[in-house]
Image: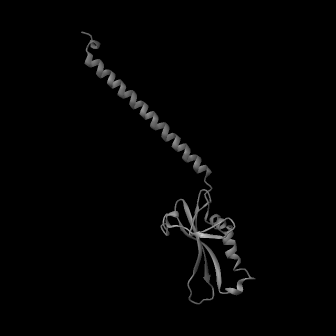
Amino acid sequence: MSVFKNKNFVIYFLLIITIIFISILLLIFISVKFQKQSQTDIIQDQNCQNISESDAIGIVQELPEVKRYLSYFSDETRVAHPSKEPKIIIDAETEETLTIRVHEIDISGQPSIGTTFNTYTIDKCTGEVICSFTIYDEQGEWVRVSEVDECGGYGDEI
């Protein structure tokens, strides 16, 4: 009696071969998918500008509304607020973003409350302003206050 004459053996043999074949195809598919993902990550990392804290502050300083705000503290216009000085600082940092705060401090030595002009969240890879507390147009004109969900909730990164 031949082994191949036994129908059950042939069916089991073909089933096992089919399972092995499908497993190999699945492993190849997963391997290719992870390889493509790794290549995508490498390309994204190569395109990332790795914005530094000073770069982010520079980006914010060049915004039209910030330039206008800083001009209020120039020697010619300082008469209105002689005891105030503008500051641009890193307020918070995450793995992907830097949050910059533009505010003024009192330099007179008298107790006072600091005033925040605006906060800006900068994407560390692209250098884009991805969120700000107050929205301005391209000319630096006030448009509106941003919605909480536009920035993922205020103060979450602090």
Q: How many marks?
A: 0
At which x and y percent is residue 117?
Answer: 60, 75
At which x and y percent is residue 63?
Answer: 67, 67
In the image, farthest residue toward the right: 76
Q: Residue drawn 35% across and 28% down?
A: 19
Residue 127 left/right relative to 157: right
In which quadrant of the rendered view does residue 20 lie? top left
At which x and y percent is residue 155?
Answer: 49, 70
Q: Nearer the viewer, residue 155 or 51?
A: 155
Q: Nearer the viewer, residue 128 or 36?
A: 128
In the image, farthest residue toward the left: 1
Q: Nearer the viewer, residue 54 or 5?
A: 5
Above or below, 36 against 5 in this view is: below
Q: Quadrant of the N terminus?
A: top left
Residue 62 left/right relative to 119: right
At which x and y percent is residue 40?
Answer: 55, 45
In the image, farthest residue toward the front: 143
Residue 27 left/right relative to 95: left
Above or below, 156 against 81 in this view is: above
Its colouring scheme is: one colour
In the image, farthest residue toward the top: 1
